[in-house]
């Protein structure tokens, strides 16, 4: 296989820590209500991590693109754009849903984001519906498409695309 030009170490760190934060938030919420505070802290951390990741993407140079068809390039761009939208929308809808419900968010005991003094339970419910029933399936679907695309490159096209992010 040819030598692969990798993304910067910072870009790779943003990618893999972000993936771990998604898994951590999912595992925590699956454990039940007693872990909701920790789930919120991880979700808020993921929001900040994603904003920093986007800033890094804007200022860091990506390696040259791997040759592929215009259709594949277009699909890859759409999946990545969708991932960024979902990675912002998922924690934002959860955070705002909690705040409009009047609940604060403790970020690992380091600081507290207070709930809104004026609650709006209808809006909070709508935001939580979007968080759970739109953003979560969207995020899962896009992550799945991202992984399938990477595996397609690795095992079908054998262009070693995965090495760029290792």
Image: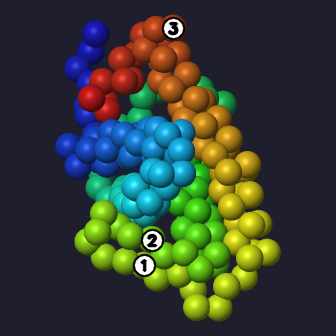
Of badges 1 and 3, nearer the viewer stands 1
Locate the C terminus and report the quarter of the image it occupies.
top left
User: How is colour applied across the structure in the image?
Assistant: rainbow
With 119 as the anchor, is 115 left or right in this view?
left
Residue 112 vertical placement versus 82 (above, below): below
Residue 26 on image: x %, y %: 50, 41
Residue 149 on image: x %, y %: 54, 24
- Residue at numbered disc 3: 156
Of badges 3 and 2, nearer the viewer stands 2
Q: In whole angstroms, how far apart are the C-alphas of marks 3 and 2?
A: 45 Å
Residue 113 is tagged as 1
Q: Are marks 2 and 1 in contact (CB under 8 Å)?
A: yes
Locate the N terminus and report the quarter of the image it occupies.
top left
Residue 154 vertical placement versus 162 (above, below): above
Q: In whole angstroms, how far apart are the C-alphas of marks 2 and 1?
A: 5 Å
Residue 11 is tagged as none
Pick the residue in front: 106 or 69: 106
Residue 71 on image: x %, y %: 66, 31
């Amino acid at each position: 296989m040819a030598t692969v030009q990798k993304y910067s170490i910072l870009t790779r760190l943003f990618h893999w820590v972000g993936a771990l934060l998604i898994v951590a938030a999912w595992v925590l919420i699956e454990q039940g209500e007693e872990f909701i505070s920790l789930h919120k802290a991880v979700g808020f951390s993921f929001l900040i991590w994603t904003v920093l990741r986007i800033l890094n993407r804007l200022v860091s140079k990506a390696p040259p693109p791997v040759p592929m068809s215009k259709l594949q390039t277009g699909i890859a761009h759409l999946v990545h754009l969708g991932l960024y939208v979902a990675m912002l929308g998922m924690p934002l809808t959860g955070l705002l849903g909690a705040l409009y419900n009047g609940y604060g968010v403790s970020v690992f005991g380091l600081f507290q984001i207070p709930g809104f003094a004026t609650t709006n339970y209808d809006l909070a419910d709508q935001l939580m519906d979007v968080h759970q029933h739109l953003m979560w399936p969207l995020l899962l679907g896009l992550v799945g498409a991202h992984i399938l695309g990477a595996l397609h490159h690795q095992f079908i096209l054998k262009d070693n695309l995965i090495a760029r992010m290792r």
